[in-house]
Image: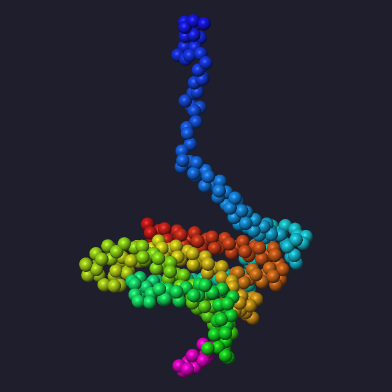
Amino acid sequence: MSTTEVSKTSPGRAVGAAPRVPASRARAPRTFEQANRRLKWAMLAPALIFVGLMILFPLVFTLNLSFTDAFGAVNAKKGYVGLRNFTDALSDSRRFWPAAQRTVIFTVGAVVIETVLGLALAMLMRKPFRGMRWVRTVLIIPLLTTPVAIGILWLLILDPTNGIANHLLASVGLPQQEFLGSVSQSLPTLMLIDVWQWTPMMTLLLLAGLTTLPEEPEEASLVDGANSWQRFRYIILPMLGPTLATALVLRSVDALKTFDILYTTKGAGGGSDFEAETLNVYSYGLTFDYQEYGLASAVLVLFTLFIIGVVVLLRRRAGRKSA
């Protein structure tokens, strides 16, 4: 074949050359970052799937159970009753609504006191001092103790007859108290126990936030003649806002779910007159004491929606303040 024939049969390309791939169909070479990203998700996928199933299955199972009349056993024959369990729970003014009220009172009271004390302790520990490491070590001891052990410990301390608390009150001339044995004093006493246990966590969170704040604004205000309260109110507190909001959300959600301390100290039903019964204790009693699984699941669904609402409200308020 001549050169002329070659040029006619394949203009611009020699015979035997590889066909030219259109630019639109050409695949760009994979970069190292893309390969690393795909490898990361491939390695994380099994754990994410497992955690997702562990979270999703109980939620779906509880939601399905809340629409049934399950009683006596979870695997017993049951029928769907629609929204009857939810209406029964919401119309229960003897147990459900008082338990919801106690849950709110316990959470708000404990979290407010823990936040104030935690912020005060964090401000005191902000600057290094001698023995600071030992103070921090002692401070986290309540966080390392199991809730059941804490409940038993405070039962012994607050025992009306042999507890050390009443002996201390008597030594300073104050009248003895019933503490957890009293209907009116049980919930405030449990709030104080929760404060003792969780104030260190608020202190550590806020202390971590304080250590990251820049020093220039506070130094400038000091040069301008601002006193300690003015520096705290107008300089430190606004800059600490995001950390404070995060700590409030975390602690509020945790306080709403409190169960161990309440059940250990007051037992089933939160006491003889349900004086310390929160929604957690109430749903536990419906499940294991009365075997009303359908109604208990409905209460848990309502409780979960309530917690989600509290988180959304707190985050919106925190975002509005930071803006």
| 117 lies left or right of 291 | left
Question: Was residue 182 drawn as part of the magenta stretch in this picture?
Answer: no
Magenta span of residues = 165-178
| Displayed quadrant of residue 202 | bottom left
- The residue nearer to you, when weighing 282 against 55, is 55
Q: Is residue 138 above or below residue 323?
A: below
Residue 210 position in % (x across, y down):
36, 66
Q: Is residue 290 visible?
A: yes
x 47%, y 92%: residue: 174
Question: Was residue 172 drawn as part of the magenta stretch in this picture?
Answer: yes
Residue 150 position in % (x across, y down):
55, 77
- The residue nearer to you, when weighing 241 against 67, is 241
- The residue nearer to you, when weighing 51 against 253, is 51
Q: Is residue 97 visible?
A: no
Q: Residue furthest left?
A: 224
x 38%, y 77%: residue: 131
